[in-house]
Amino acid sequence: MTAAPQQLDPGDLLGLPGVLGSFRASLDFGALDISPDGGEAVFSWNVAGSYDLYTLALRGGDPGRLTNTPSASRSMHPRYSPLGDRIAFLRDRDGDERFHIWVVDRATGEEQQLTSTEANREAIEWSADGLHLVYRAHSAGGLGIWMLDAGSGDERPVVTGVRDPGSDHVTPDISHDGRHIVFHAAAEEDPADVGIWVVPSDGSAPPRRLPTHEGARARAVLPRWGPGDDSIAFTTDTRGRFEVALLPMSRAQPAGEVRYLTDAPHDETALGWGPTGRMLYRQSTDSTIRLLRADPATGAGESLVAGPGVCFAAREARDGTVAYVWTSPTAPPELYTRAPGEEAQQRTWSLPAGFDRDRLTPPDHVWYPGADGSPTPALLYVPRSSGAGPQAAIVWAHGGGTWQHLQCWDPIPQWLTGHGYVVLAPNARGSRGYGRAHREGNVGDWGGKDLEDHVRGADWLEATGVADGSRIGMYGSSGGGYMTSIALTCAPDRFAAGVTSCGIVSLETFYRSTRADLRGMVRAYMGSPDEDPQLFHERSPLTHIDRIQAPLLVLHGGTDPRVPASEAALLVEALRVRGIIHDYHVYPDEGHGFRDLANQSDALRRIVAWFDQHLRGRAAPPPPPT
């Protein structure tokens, strides 16, 4: 007799600490730093409840807490000053994503807020003389590159009206001589054409675009000045995949042709130079992200971190020691160090004593035939212990446009498999990590063949006998919420139930009511409703709402700044008018995604209860207490 699944409680998964890491490029590079003398690392960790800064001696010892962050706020993106006497960092208030720049004295621990005006500041870097900080900021004037006087706190814009390319957020870097800033931005005439720009740090001249892919339509992102300002390293997909490239420079002018660091078949992302003159970069293979280091002159390199998991961020010390953040499906993000000639050492321990990792489910990386029979990659989670025969299953659509499902710590699939559900997490066309052709496979076709890839995933689960075809549901948040809604309306016979969280339902309404940078993302995939109103109409779930048959649970944040709560209200009203079984819950004080642990727990319970009721025929539980 097969054992029943080892059910998890939300408390087993939510609120567990971890070293701060993110899929966003701005945080990948900025999750930690190493002091100029190479003696210690600083990183953000929430082991005490809030994300605070901690320091750690690279050659031994335990982490020590450096800051005292108010509850629900976050201190993150630490940066040592060139002398190592101060650490600049970002701190928001109550998770509002409006970050101010702070500094903490390394010797005394005294904290000081440097900025006062309302803006969202990100991706900070020191100038080499320690007098200024450069960063990007969203303010009333839109996205721009700014500089801050680290003594007086005076801020000034260097560039305004920067077009954010969306999935690779703008990350400015200041030259070693302090005279120029390099950054990437989307072209005015084509948001899918992303280039590298250089601008005088005093703002005395407009930005100039560098020749990273002249005559081609491509993305060149994440630029970093090399030693002596004699080159710029960046990531580009000009040759069909993301890879690390170098552009020779002299006095902030191009001084040669673009040269590629390696010639591997995988997507690779530049992290920048270390003090040894070698290049750190990451390589994506089958939803695993590895860490590598190479000599930029020859391309000869070494693998530093491999195996199933994800390296979020890394920094190199003067002696070649590397500190990095690594996570896997059964381990939250932790800080590791690796000294030359030695094995890697785990330096933080976030899981509580006695936590049973055997209750977690590591996924398999699989391929199945998607739209047009094209191979579609996915992660497949099958509960360690479940009943005999095909099981109830959930197709889980990721959000964020070109995001991808990764072999990393994530409570959602563990929560679902812990309750006996098979979970298929497709990296459908439009997902990164599998080359440019796959990532751009839904450009101009959002909600088309990428939708079919998800539907074919459910077909594959049934055809292989992994799942009972009559008991397959679909779930997604943000862009995945949109995919869930349109799947239930355009493939009404395929899914028996659905859950959408923070999802778009009327593309035109969303486009006209959301932020400029998100409109830019939609333009890159679909144009605008003024250019092609018929496409926007056809690809909106509301257009096909009369077809929906499956019960649908709708969750949303009442203060969502990206997908307004009015989107959920439109969907729910359409379901009500048509008599479709549905439920609707708004978390009044939540934005795009839920931060409060009580709300996260409540959402997870509602999701499983909904699928239990409509995929397994179990009675609906009583409503949770208010």
Image (spheres, helix red, strand yellow):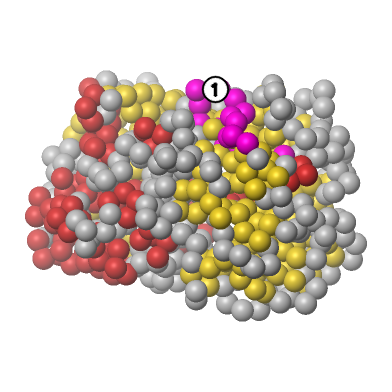
In the displayed structure image, the side of residue 117 where residue 2 appears, left or right: left
In the picture, which quadrant includes the N terminus?
Answer: top left
Give the residue displayed 17% in from the left and 38% down from the top: 494
Q: Which residue is mark 1?
A: 264
- Can residue 463 be seen from the camera position used here? yes
In the picture, which quadrant includes the C terminus?
Answer: bottom left
Give the residue displayed 76% in from the left and 42% down from the top: 227
Give the residues drawn in magenta, as a range.
256-273
Residue 157 included in the magenta stretch of the image: no
Dividing the picture into quarters, in which one does residue 270 lie? top right
In the displayed structure image, the side of residue 95 where residue 389 appears, left or right: left
Residue 508 percent across, percent down from the top left: 24, 63
Dividing the picture into quarters, in which one does residue 457 lie? top left
Residue 553 percent across, percent down from the top left: 27, 55
Label 1 packing within 10 angstroms: few (<14), some (14-19), many (20+): few
Q: Amino acid at mark 1?
A: Ala
Residue 259 included in the magenta stretch of the image: yes
Q: Secondary structure at mark 1?
A: loop
Give the residue displayed 26% in from the left and 59% down from the top: 528
Dividing the picture into quarters, in which one does residue 435 lie? top left
Judge by depth and name the residue closer to the eye, 388 or 457. Answer: 457
Residue 416 percent across, percent down from the top left: 40, 41
Residue 12 percent across, percent down from the top left: 54, 46
- Can residue 71 be seen from the camera position used here? no
**How many numbered callouts?**
1
* On screen, residue 606 above or below 239: below
Give the residue displayed 53% in from the left and 43% down from the top: 211
* On screen, residue 607 above or below 426: below
